[in-house]
Amino acid sequence: MRNANAITALVAGGAGFIGSHLIDALLAEGATVVSLDSYLTGRPENLRHLDHEARFDSVHADIVEALPARISRTRFSHVFNLACAASPPHYQADPEHTMLTNVLGTRNLLRLAEETGARFLLTSTSEVYGDPEQHPQREAYRGWVSCTGPRACYDEGKRAAETLTFDYQRAGRADVRVARIFNTYGPRMRPDDGRVVSNVICQALSGEDVTVYGDGSQTRSFCYVSDLVEGLMRLMASDADDGPVNLGNPNELTVADLVERVMRMTGSRSRVVHRPLPVDDPRRRKPDIGRAKARLGWEPVVPLQRGLEETAAWFADEQARSAPPERPAGRPALVEVAAE
C-alpha cells in the first residue's frame, strides 16, 4: 500500500490496540482513514493524537447493527475488519455479541466492500487452530476446536467469518484477504485485557503477584505490533490468493520463560502464583509463516527483548498517569539486559 494518497480506508475496530497502530501506518503513507468502533473494548485515547488530523475521521457505531449513513455513503477503496474483542475475558463477557460481531458484522462489512468495490481484509486468528495437534500450525491445518466450550464464541465465530469471506470471493462479490493473527503485543494494549504479556508486565510493575495459569510450560509466539501491522499492510496490497495467511512470530517460548524475562527486565520482586489452566487453553502455539515469506516477503524484525522493553515502558507511563495525586508515581526503572 505504498503511495497511498488515493486510498480511502475504513478500519473497523480502529480504536483498538492493533487497529489504532494500523491507522497510524495508513495515515503515514498518505491514506484517508475512517475509524469505526463501538468502544466496547477500543479506547478513545488510542486515537486522541489524531484529533487534528485532516485525513482522519472517527465514527462511533457497532458493526452488528446497520452501518451508519456516514459509512455507507463513503466510497472506500479498502476495508479492514479488526472489529472484535480478542482477549478471553472480554469476548467471554458477552459471547452472543462476540459471535454476532464475527458473523453479522463481517457480513455487513463485506456488503459494504461489495457495494463500493473496496478490497476487504479480515483479521482472523490463530484460535481457529484451537488446541492444535499439528505443530507448528500451517494454514492448511484444519484445527482442533471445541465448538461448545467457553472460547467457541470467538474461535468458531472467526472460523465462520473466514467461511463467509471466502464465499464472497468465490461468488465474485468481493476482493478479499484473510490474516490469521498470532499473539501480538505492544503499546496501547489494555491493562485489563487478560492476555499474558499485559498481565505479567502490569503485575510486575505494580508489585502484585504475577499470575501464571497452569505450570507455565504452555508456549506462545509473540509478535510486536509494528511487525504485525506491516504484515497486514503487505497482505492488503498483495495479489489475490485463495487462502488465509499466518501473521505471527515463529520464535516460540514458554509462559514461564516470558515471566522470567519480564521479572528480570523490570527488577520486580513480585511473587509468581499459579492458577488452574482455563478450559480449552492451547498448550502450544507457533505459526508456520512460510506463506507470508513467499507471498508477502514478510517476517518479523523486532527482537522480543526490545519489544518487551517498549511495552513495559508504555505500561509504566500509563500507571504513572493513572496514579492518585496523593501518591505520585514515576516510571519504574527498567533493568538493562542484553538485546537479542
Image (spheres, rainbow, N blue to C red):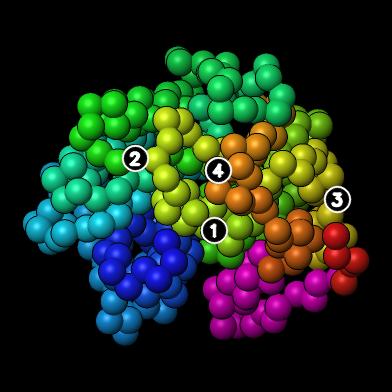
Q: Which tag is nearer the camera, tag 1 or tag 4?
A: 4
In the image, taking residue 63 as reference, residue 216 lies left or right, namely right
- Please indicate whether residue 286 sits to the left or right of residue 240 in the image: right
Q: Residues within 10 Å of mark 2 (few under 14, many from 20)?
A: many
- Would you place residue 115 above or below residue 268 in this image? above
10 Å crowding of disc 3: few (<14), some (14-19), many (20+): few
Tell me which residue sits at (85%, 65%) in the image: 339
Question: Quick one: SS at disc 1?
Answer: helix
Query: Residue at left 43%, top 58%?
Result: 19
Q: Amino acid at mark 3?
A: Glu
- Choose the circle earlier in sequence order: 2 or 4: 2
User: Mark 1 or mark 4, which has the lower sequence index?
Assistant: 1
Q: Amino acid at mark 4?
A: Arg
- Mark nearer the N terminus (3 vs 1): 1
Residue that numbered label 4 is attached to: 295
Q: Which quarter of the picture shows residue 135?
A: top right
Between circles 3 and 4, the one closer to the viewer is 4
Residue range corresponding to the magenta coloring:
311-335
